[in-house]
Amino acid sequence: MADRPSDGNAAREAARVLCVPASETIVIVFSGAIVGILTHWVKRSRACPGVESCPPAAHRGNSTWYGYAPVRLYQSDRRLWVPRTLEVTENLEELLRSYDLAGQVWALHRQCEGRRRSGRVEGAYLETRTDAALVTPFDVRPAVQRLYHQVEIAFGVKNPTPPRVMLPVAAAAAPIGWVETASADPRPPTAEQLEALRRMAGRGGNPTDVGQRRRTPQASSNGKAHP
Ligand SMILES: [Zn+2]
């Protein structure tokens, strides 16, 4: 029973890989830096073993970068910080890039749109801790090797995503033909409305149609233009 949480300091846990869940905000402290790898999709996600050992077709195909960081996750029900290997997405790495992470406590959550399982991971800095039990780094590579069932993995790859280009938002007049009703619905569009917008964009339709359809759904029933 040595693993029971009631044993307090004696409890040990594997630093297994932790993905930021869609359903809740998690709070973690970084115990060290992010280590990056490339993955290739070959029927499943495979870690790149490095250009010398990687099948050329796979290596030339689409790659997705993932980072892994040693963290301690706060479990409020147990009032314990448990070791985990945090999976860091490309956009989260971009957010964290300018910080000296060791000892920093962050709240992380995943922004999900509709039914998509994956979404942007976002985070907020909370505080910096110096407790040895929280900031002592550990090697994340074994957990990553277990995750991919691969021993040969090229670690230390930098996130290849180019930095986001930030530009000012323009508060200018609406485009010609765009119908703005006085009682405009202040809520964001629903999933169905977004899907209609995407279909429209794919067909090269014009956004006025979507705007009108959204506000007067019955109008589309006799419109031959939109079967
Ligand atoms: Zn490769």
Image (spheres, rainbow, N blue to C red):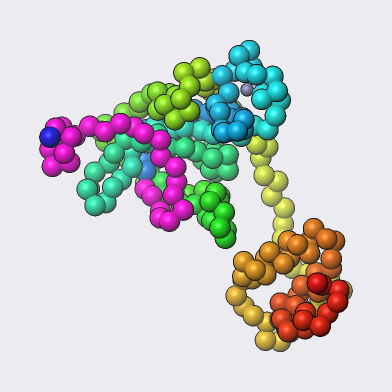
Q: Give the total number of marks visible in the rendering.
A: 0
| Residue drawn 81% across the image and 83% down it | 222
Q: Residue at x 73, y 61 (%)?
A: 198
Residue 174 visible? The answer is no
- Front-most of 126 and 94? 94
Residue 10 part of the magenta-drawn span: yes
Task: Give whichever of 59, 173 is nearer the camera.
Answer: 59
Find residue 34 and report its horizontal and vertical position in percent. 48, 31
- Location of residue 4 (image quadrant): top left
* Residue stretch in magenta: 2-27
Residue found at x 36% / y 40%: 29
Q: Is residue 85 visible?
A: yes
Q: Is residue 196 above or below residue 127?
A: below
Residue drawn 47% across and 49% down? 123
Residue 111 place in picture, x, y as percent: 52, 55
Of residue 101 and residue 195, the one placed in the foreground of this image is: 195
Ligand 1 occupies quarter: top right
Prevailing secondary structure class for the magenta stretch in the rendered image: loop
x then y, percent, for residue 196: 72, 67
**In which quadrant of the rendered image does the C terminus lie?**
bottom right
- Is residue 21 one of those drawn in magenta? yes
